Amino acid sequence: MSAVERGPTCRFCGLAGLPAGARFCARCGRPLSGAGMVTSHPPPAPLWVLVLLWLGTVGLLLLVVVYGVVAIGLAPIRSVPPGADRASVRAASTVVAVGAAVLCLAHGVAAAGLSARRAWSRPLATLVCATWTLTCVGLPVALLAIDAIWRVRRDGGPAPVPPA
């Protein structure tokens, strides 16, 4: 059997003898170049998803600042009843500030990656949207955003938005 009959060779890992119609390498999983393969960037994310991600970034940054100020002791804690443990309030504020900082970073990186049409940003944005189900944004918006991020037409372009 000749090399042409055996199929393509992966240009990344060198695996030879792949099936003739293979679209991905059986060893490394990378896409093989060929007819019908889409080698461009993923389709752009809908604008409303990007706006939600950037608004989430800004909102979470504000939370980081407010809780961070309380956590490091720059703001007096007036709402704590007398006799309550102020150290516990500061510790809880630290946990909230750190959690908000991580989510803020994830929102910003996901938004920037989707804006630049990077393939890695779609799974990250999906995780960010999944965290929305635990917040005030809620499950319906999260599911709509995840669907909008991953929906594509057969020609590789973004799917049209159905009429309201």
Image: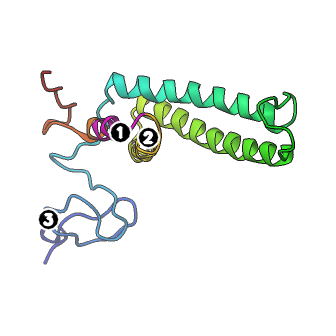
Tell me the quarter of the picture where residue 61 sits: top right
Circle on res. 142? 1
Task: For marks 2 and 1, give the CA distance.
Answer: 6 Å
* Marks 2 & 3, CB-CB < 8 Å contact: no
For residue 80: magenta? no
Pointer 3: residues within 10 angstroms few (<14), some, or many (20+)? Answer: few
**Majority SS type along the magenta span:** helix
* Marks 2 & 1, CB-CB < 8 Å contact: yes
Quadrant in the picture for the N terminus:
bottom left
Tell me the quarter of the picture where residue 41 sits: top left
Residue drawn at the location 79% of the way across and 36% of the way down:
80
Residue drawn at the location 59% of the way across and 38% of the way down:
105
For residue 139: magenta? yes
Horizontal arrangement in the rendering, residue 116 relative to residue 68 (left or right)? left
Residue drawn at the location 41% of the way across and 26% of the way down:
50
Frontmost residue, 100 versus 138? 138
Frontmost residue, 29 versus 17? 29
Q: Where is residue 120? Give x, y as percent.
A: 43, 45
* Three-letter code, disc 2: Trp
Q: Secondary structure at mark 1?
A: helix
Residue occupied by mark 3: 20
Residue 127's place in the image compared with 44, above or below, is below
Circle on res. 132? 2
Residue mark closest to the camera, 3 vs 1: 1
Which residues are the magenta region? 137-146
Quadrant in the picture for the C terminus:
top left
The earlier-in-sequence mark between 3 and 1 is: 3
Pointer 2: residues within 10 angstroms few (<14), some, or many (20+)? Answer: some
* Three-letter code, disc 3: Ala
Residue 121's place in the image compared with 65, above or below, is below
Q: Where is residue 35? Give x, y as percent.
A: 15, 47
Q: Where is residue 81? Give x, y as percent.
A: 80, 37
